[in-house]
């Protein structure tokens, strides 16, 4: 029995010693492992370490490997396989190159001795950021959200890739350039995501849109330009719209294509509306156009006929696109005054309403429809050297101060015509002074029917009345006016008219 005890003790001791053997191999692990980025060399890290403190035998080589743990800070890899970068017989540092930017790596260094690879030393490092190398994808126009003066663009979200996520994302940077006006400055801006609406654009205008990724360290490349056109809108006014030919009864207007058509011009609308008739005191202008014309896109003139002479007309023009009518341009023009009216009748003197310094004459006009006013022209005898040529056209006579021997004494609006006028009453009529006449002076008096509009006018004169101031023939007829003149009282006028009848009656009775 005594011989069996040592054997039992021996077996128990062997079981106790075996478990501690691996702890001796752990002393072969390298020490102070560090991994740092190499400045100025993107994608490179420097791995350094200290040899093992107590290897079981001399180190034969060092194995340096690495694993990608997090790609571009957006993709975590599970159970990645290590990549052996080098096996070094000497040295305690190594530079790993070709790593992805903005990613996390785990470096591994193992010492190999006569008994094999020892324990692994591990360390993590994040590579530096670089600007993106890829543009956004899927750039497109949102037609349903675009119009004549705005456009809506969108693009795909950033994918988790090194080309787009090689740095911390900040925003998208876009640029919109005019294709039709390449010298204009581009429209630029930023957006966190699509879609992006851009306003205040020109209608029916081509633009090129491109977008890039803006990261923490810089901008990536732009996407390929996407050329689009804004939709049509209403055009501006027709250019150079005006009336260039007028007559008594017609008006012609012309125009050019709008400076900003904002689309394809489909037609023009031209309207005419009478706005005033100076000769017609009862005229009320219509509220809307009396004539409307729709003309083709290549028509640039229109003539209106059968119009009233001496009248104002309002012309309007508007261009159209598929969007609708543009801004209306309005001009006012006029037809020429009537050129063939008859003129007033020969004036008749009312001796009972006349005196030594004025003469009252009739003012009757059988053809006064197109007349706007009446002129009274007065001419007196004067030495030939002092007389200027007299042209009865409403202007050549001028005022009394210009020529006291041939002048316009009055201009009376048609609405103020009472059927007679006092020549020489000393009042102002239409800017003309009706100067008192000189007793005993022979005057030639004419009445002119004036048809005028704007700066055009025509005057048609009555036959000439010759009358000496203060020397009037009194006929045995009832006076033209019941108002006594300054030269004769009512009783004097009655006596002057009754004397011839009394003489005739006495002769008949004898």
Image (tube, helix red, strand yellow):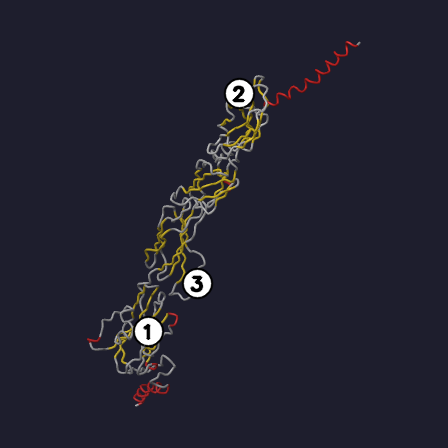
**Mark 1 / mark 3, whichever is N-terminal:** 3
Residue at the outermost right position: 1
**Of residues 225 and 287, the one drawn nearer to the viewer in this rendering:** 225
> Residue 391 in the image: x percent, y percent?
25, 69
Q: Which residue is mark 3?
A: 284
Give the spatial CA distance, label 3 vs label 2.
Answer: 114 Å
Instruction: From the viewer's perspective, tell me whether residue 493 is left or right of residue 405.
Output: right
**Of residues 244 and 69, the one drawn nearer to the viewer in this rendering:** 69
Give the spatial CA distance, label 1 vs label 3.
Answer: 30 Å
Which quadrant of the rendered structure holds the C terminus? Answer: bottom left
Q: What secondary structure is marked by label 1?
A: strand
Given this view, does label 1 or label 3 mark the residue nearer the observer?
1
Q: Which residue is mark 1?
A: 432
Instruction: From the viewer's perspective, tell me whether residue 148 is left or right of residue 112.
Output: left
Q: Which residue is mark 2?
A: 61
Give above or below for 294 relative to 172: below
**Of residues 198 and 456, the one drawn nearer to the viewer in this rendering:** 198
Residue 67 visible in the displayed image: no
Give above or below for 7 relative to 427: above
Q: What secondary structure is marked by label 2?
A: strand
Give the spatial CA distance, label 1 vs label 2.
Answer: 126 Å
- Rate crowding at label 1 as few (under 14), some (14 to 19) or many (20 or more) other CA atoms within 10 Å: many
Residue at the outermost bottom position: 510
Residue at the outermost left position: 385
């Amino acid at each position: 029995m005594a011989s069996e005890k040592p054997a039992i003790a021996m077996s128990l001791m062997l079981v106790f010693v075996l478990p501690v053997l691996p702890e001796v191999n752990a002393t072969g692990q390298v020490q102070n492992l560090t991994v740092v980025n190499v400045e100025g060399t993107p994608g490179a890290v420097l791995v350094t370490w200290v040899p093992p403190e107590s290897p079981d035998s001399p180190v034969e080589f060092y194995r340096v490997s690495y694993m990608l743990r997090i790609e571009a800070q957006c993709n975590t890899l599970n159970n990645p396989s290590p990549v052996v970068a080098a096996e070094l017989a000497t040295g305690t540092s190594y530079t790993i190159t070709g790593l992805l930017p903005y990613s996390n790596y785990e470096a591994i260094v193992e010492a190999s001795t006569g008994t094999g690879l020892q324990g692994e030393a591990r360390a993590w490092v994040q590579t530096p950021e670089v600007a993106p190398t890829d543009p956004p994808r899927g750039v497109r126009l949102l037609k349903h959200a675009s119009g004549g003066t705005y456009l809506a663009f969108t693009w795909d979200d950033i994918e988790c890739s090194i080309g787009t996520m090689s740095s911390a994302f900040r925003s998208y940077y876009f640029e919109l350039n005019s294709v039709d006006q390449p010298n204009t400055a581009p429209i630029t801006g930023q957006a966190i995501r699509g879609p992006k609406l851009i306003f205040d654009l020109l209608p029916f205008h081509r633009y090129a849109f491109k977008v890039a990724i803006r990261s923490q360290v810089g901008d990536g490349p732009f996407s390929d330009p996407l050329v689009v056109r804004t939709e049509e809108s209403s055009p501006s006014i027709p250019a150079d719209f005006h009336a260039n030919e007028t007559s008594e009864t017609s008006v012609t207007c012309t125009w050019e294509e709008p400076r900003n058509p904002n689309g394809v011009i489909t037609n023009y609308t031209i309207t005419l509306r009478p706005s005033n008739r100076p000769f017609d005191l009862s005229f009320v202008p219509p509220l809307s156009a009396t004539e409307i014309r729709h003309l083709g896109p290549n028509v640039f003139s229109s003539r209106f006929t059968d119009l009233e002479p001496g009248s104002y007309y309002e012309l309007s023009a508007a261009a159209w696109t598929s969007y609708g009518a543009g801004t209306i341009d309005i001009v006012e023009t006029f037809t020429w005054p009537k050129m063939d009216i008859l003129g007033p009748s020969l004036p008749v003197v009312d001796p009972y309403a006349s005196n030594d310094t004025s003469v009252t004459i009739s003012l009757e006009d059988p053809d006064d429809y197109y007349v706007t006013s009446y002129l009274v022209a007065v001419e007196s005898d004067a030495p030939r050297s002092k007389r200027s040529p007299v042209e009865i056209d409403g202007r050549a006579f001028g005022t009394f101060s210009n020529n006291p021997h041939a002048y316009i004494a009055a201009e009376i609006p048609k609405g103020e015509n009472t059927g007679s006028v006092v020549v020489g009453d000393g009042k102002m009529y239409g800017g003309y002074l009706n100067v008192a006449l000189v007793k005993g002076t022979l005057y030639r008096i004419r009445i002119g029917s004036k048809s005028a509009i704007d700066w055009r006018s025509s005057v048609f004169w009555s036959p000439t009345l010759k009358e000496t101031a203060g020397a009037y023939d009194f006929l045995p007829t009832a006076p033209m006016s019941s108002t006594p003149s300054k030269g004769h009282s009512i009783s004097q006028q009655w006596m002057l008219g009754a004397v011839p009848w009394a003489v005739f009656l006495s002769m008949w009775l004898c």
